[in-house]
C-alpha cells in the first residue's frame, strides 16, 4: 500500500529559500540578543558583583531558591501522579459501555477543561472554607492542578486508546479475555507507548503552572524569588531584582529542558522497541500449534 504524501518534497530553489530564511532568522535573533545585552550592560546589570549574590551562601539566596524549588517539585510530583491516575480513570469511564457513566464522566471532563486553572485554585482555597472544608495552600494548589490536568490527560488517554487498531481488541476478545484484561494488557500498553511524548509535554505544562501558587501565597519558586526581591529591595533598592528573576527563570527552563529531553528519549526508546518487536518472531505458547492450513489451533490435551 502506498503511503499518502501530505506535502511535496521541496526542490532546489525551495531548499535555497529555506536556508536563506533560516539564516536571516538566526541573524535577527542574534541581533536582538546583542541589543538586549548592550542595554543591560549600559544599565550595569551585567556587573559580576550583582550576579555573585546568587552564589554567595552568606546572602541566603541559594538556600532560599533551593527550598522554593523543593516545594515546587513537591507540588509538581504529587500533582503529576494524582492527575495521571485520575485522568486514566476518567478516560476509561468515558469509554464505558454504560451510557450514563460516559455522560457523567464526559460532563466532568468538559467542565474542568473549560474552567480556568486559576479559578479552580481560588475556589479550592477561598470558596471551600465557606462550606466547612479548609485546605492548605499546598493542597489547594495541588487540587487545582490535578482537576484541570486530569481532564486534559483523560482526553489524551482516550485518544491513545482509540488509536489502537480495532483488530487488537477483537483478537483479545476472541482469545477469551475479559474487558478489564483487554484494557490493561492489550490496549493501554500500546496506547501509552504512542502518547508518551504528549503525556510528558502535558506534565511540563503542569510544572510551569505551579507558579500560580504565588496567588494564594504558596512559597513556590516564583513566590520565593518575589520574596527575595522584596527583601533585597528594602536593603539595597532595585539592585538585584533582575538577577533574582533571571535565576528563577533559568531554574524553570532547566527543569523543562530535562523533561523535554526525557520525552524525546522515551519516544526514541519506544520506537526502537516497537521496531524490534515487529522484526522479532514471536514464539507460540506450548499449548498452541499450527494447523495444516497455516491456522493456529489449540494443542490436543
Image (cartoon, grey):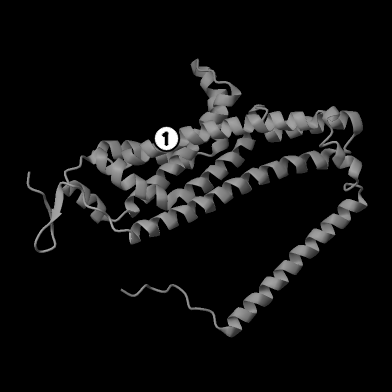
140 and 115: which one is in front?
A: 140
Q: Is residue 136 visible?
A: yes
Q: Is residue 215 visible?
A: no
Q: Residues within 10 Å of mark 1 (few under 14, many from 20)?
A: some
Q: Is residue 267 left or right of residue 14?
A: left
The N terminus appears in which quarter of the rendering?
bottom left
User: Regarding mark 1 in the picture, which secondary structure is present there?
Assistant: helix
Q: Is residue 212 left or right of residue 134?
A: right
Extreme residue toward the top, this view: 132
112 and 41: which one is in front?
A: 41
170 and 262: which one is in front?
A: 262
| Quarter residue 123 falls in | top right
Percent position of residue 180, x then y: 26, 38
Extreme residue toward the left, this view: 300
295 and 145: which one is in front?
A: 295
Percent position of residue 85, x then y: 42, 35
Q: Is residue 230 left or right of residue 120?
A: right
Percent position of residue 23, x then y: 71, 72
- Residue at (34, 45) in percent of width and height: 188
Q: Is residue 53 left or right of residue 246?
A: right
What residue would you read off at disc 1? 85
The C terminus appears in which quarter of the rendering?
top left
Q: How many marks?
A: 1
Percent position of residue 164, x then y: 32, 53
- Residue at (14, 53) in percent of width and height: 289
Amino acid at each position: 500500500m502506498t503511503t499518502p504524501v501530505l506535502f511535496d518534497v521541496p526542490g532546489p530553489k525551495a531548499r535555497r529559500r529555506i536556508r536563506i530564511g533560516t539564516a536571516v532568522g538566526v541573524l535577527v535573533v542574534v541581533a536582538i540578543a546583542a541589543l538586549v545585552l548592550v542595554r543591560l550592560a549600559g544599565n550595569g546589570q551585567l556587573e559580576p558583583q550583582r550576579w555573585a549574590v546568587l552564589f554567595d551562601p552568606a546572602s541566603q539566596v541559594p538556600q532560599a531558591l533551593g527550598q522554593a524549588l523543593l516545594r515546587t517539585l513537591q507540588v509538581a510530583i504529587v500533582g503529576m501522579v494524582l492527575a495521571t491516575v485520575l485522568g486514566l480513570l476518567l478516560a476509561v469511564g468515558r469509554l464505558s459501555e454504560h451510557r450514563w457513566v460516559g455522560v457523567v464522566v464526559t460532563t466532568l471532563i468538559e467542565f474542568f477543561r473549560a474552567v480556568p486553572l486559576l479559578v479552580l485554585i481560588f475556589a479550592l482555597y477561598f470558596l471551600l472554607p465557606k462550606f466547612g472544608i479548609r485546605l492548605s495552600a499546598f493542597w489547594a494548589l495541588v487540587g487545582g492542578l490535578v482537576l484541570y490536568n486530569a481532564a486534559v490527560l483523560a482526553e489524551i488517554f482516550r485518544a491513545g486508546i482509540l488509536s489502537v487498531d480495532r483488530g487488537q481488541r477483537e483478537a483479545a476478545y476472541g482469545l477469551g479475555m475479559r474487558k478489564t484484561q483487554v484494557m490493561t494488557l492489550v490496549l493501554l500498553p500500546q496506547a501509552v507507548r504512542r502518547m508518551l511524548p504528549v503525556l510528558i509535554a502535558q506534565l511540563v505544562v503542569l510544572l510551569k503552572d505551579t507558579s500560580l501558587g504565588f496567588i494564594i501565597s504558596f512559597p513556590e519558586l516564583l513566590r520565593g524569588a518575589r520574596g527575595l526581591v522584596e527583601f533585597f529591595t528594602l536593603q539595597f533598592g532595585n539592585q538585584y531584582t533582575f538577577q533574582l528573576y533571571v535565576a528563577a527563570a533559568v531554574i524553570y527552563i532547566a527543569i523543562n529542558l530535562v523533561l523535554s529531553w526525557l520525552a524525546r528519549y522515551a519516544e526514541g526508546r519506544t520506537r526502537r522497541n516497537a521496531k524490534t518487536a515487529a522484526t522479532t518472531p514471536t514464539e507460540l505458547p506450548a499449548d498452541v500449534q499450527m494447523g495444516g492450513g497455516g491456522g493456529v489451533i489449540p494443542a490436543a490435551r
